């Protein structure tokens, strides 16, 4: 068989559809965000069960600041509450938690909680869980480019040393296995400025299921779909088959 490895090592999810889920129940959007927490817990449990090594979740994009202030405020409160309640449990399950994105934008109490959670779980390696907050794929490429410019300015590297490999080392998640499966819930077929660089050869999977409804069975379906894909990386199917 010329299929991908059966279980993706690294899954990323655009957790979309909370607002519509709440609207269908005549409740405020924040109700949907809250309901999304359970889906996050299920996704973590599923990854632990299936042997997925890395789970990267899009929780708040650099563009989400444009939402009504009340919704942004409710989301920030939710992050604080989730951090206070969930970190110990994640730690108990051997999860290493990291936040990616421009964390400077968050207020001090939230930043402190994020840093504490990262430090507290830094020794774990059963599952790497990355939560993207104030994250944008373009921001990521810009910050990596700045690192490269700085390294050239300091004389650490020559401009000719900058290639895909070198620049990629400054991108978020560079130290982790490459992204295998990119999932988006909520029925939209777009990337919304998530992992642009890292998704270059990820398998894409879109589902209409709204994030609060995304459960074990939904993730299992996505993984089964992934297992049937043939990852060719520019080669022909025959070449891929010959290498297996
Ligand atoms: C995703 O759900 C959660 C965040 C962006 C924080 P949405 O809030 O975008 O839900 P819809 O797309 O409006 O249904
Ligand atoms: C993407 O969802 C961001 C997160 C899930 C955190 P959005 O709902 O913000 O994306 P758009 O605006 O529909 O593209
Ligand atoms: Mg949305």
Image (cartoon, helix red, strand yellow):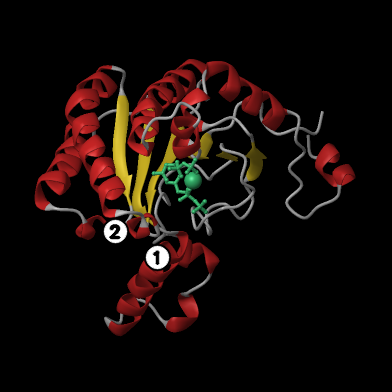
* Residue 102 image position (x, y, % from top left): 29, 58
Placement of 81 over or under 107, stated as above or below: above
Q: Residues within 10 Å of mark 2 (few under 14, many from 20)?
A: some
Quadrant of the rendered structure where residue 182 is? top right
Whether residue 219 is visible, yes or no, is yes
Q: Residue at x 35, y 41 (%)?
A: 131
Residue at numbered disc 1: 139
In the picture provided, is 204 more to the left or to the right than 177? right
* Residue 7 image position (x, y, % from top left): 60, 26
* Residue 115 image position (x, y, % from top left): 17, 44
Tell me the quadrant of the picture where the N terminus can be found: top right
Is ligand 2 within 8 Å of the beta carbon of the residue shown at mark 2?
A: no
Give 130 or 147, whichever is nearer the viewer: 130
Q: Earlier in the sequence, mark 1 or mark 2?
A: 2
How far apart are the two marked residues, 1 and 2, measured between alpha carbons?
Answer: 8 Å
Q: Residues within 10 Å of mark 1 (few under 14, many from 20)?
A: some
Q: Residue at x 14, y 38 (%)?
A: 116
Residue at numbered disc 2: 102
Whether residue 53 is visible, yes or no, is no
In the picture provided, is 223 more to the left or to the right than 79? right
* Residue 243 image position (x, y, % from top left): 79, 39
Q: Residue at x 25, y 38 (%)?
A: 79
Give 82 or 146, whichever is nearer the viewer: 82
Is the C-beta separation of discs 1 and 2 under 8 Å?
A: yes
Tell me the quadrant of the picture where the C terminus can be found: top right
* Element under disc 1: helix
Disc marking residue 99: none
Q: Residue at x 28, y 42 (%)?
A: 75
In the picture provided, is 56 more to the left or to the right than 197? left
Placement of 177 over or under 227, stated as above or below: below
Q: Quadrant of ligand 1?
A: top left
């Amino acid at each position: 068989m010329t299929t991908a490895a059966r279980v993706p090592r690294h899954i990323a999810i655009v957790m979309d559809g909370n607002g519509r889920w709440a609207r269908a129940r005549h409740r405020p959007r924040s109700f949907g965000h809250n309901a999304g927490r359970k889906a996050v817990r299920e996704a973590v449990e599923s990854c632990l069960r299936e042997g997925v090594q890395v789970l990267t979740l899009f929780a708040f994009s650099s563009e989400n600041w444009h939402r009504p202030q009340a919704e942004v405020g409710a989301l920030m409160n939710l992050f604080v509450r989730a951090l206070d309640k969930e970190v110990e449990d994640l730690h108990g399950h051997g999860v290493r938690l990291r936040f990616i994105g421009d964390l400077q934008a968050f207020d001090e109490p939230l930043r402190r909680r994020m840093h504490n959670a990262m430090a507290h779980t830094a020794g774990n390696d059963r599952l790497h869980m990355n939560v993207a907050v104030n994250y944008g794929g373009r921001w990521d490429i810009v910050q990596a480019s700045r690192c490269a410019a700085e390294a050239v300015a300091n004389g650490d590297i020559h401009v000719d040393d900058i290639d895909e490999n070198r620049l990629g080392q400054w991108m978020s998640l560079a130290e982790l296995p490459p992204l295998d499966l990119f999932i988006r819930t909520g029925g939209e077929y777009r990337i919304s400025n998530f992992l642009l660089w890292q998704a270059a050869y990820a398998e894409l999977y879109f589902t209409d299921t709204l994030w609060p409804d995304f459960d074990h069975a939904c993730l299992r379906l996505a993984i089964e779909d992934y297992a049937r894909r043939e990852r060719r990386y520019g080669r022909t199917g025959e070449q891929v088959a010959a290498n297996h």
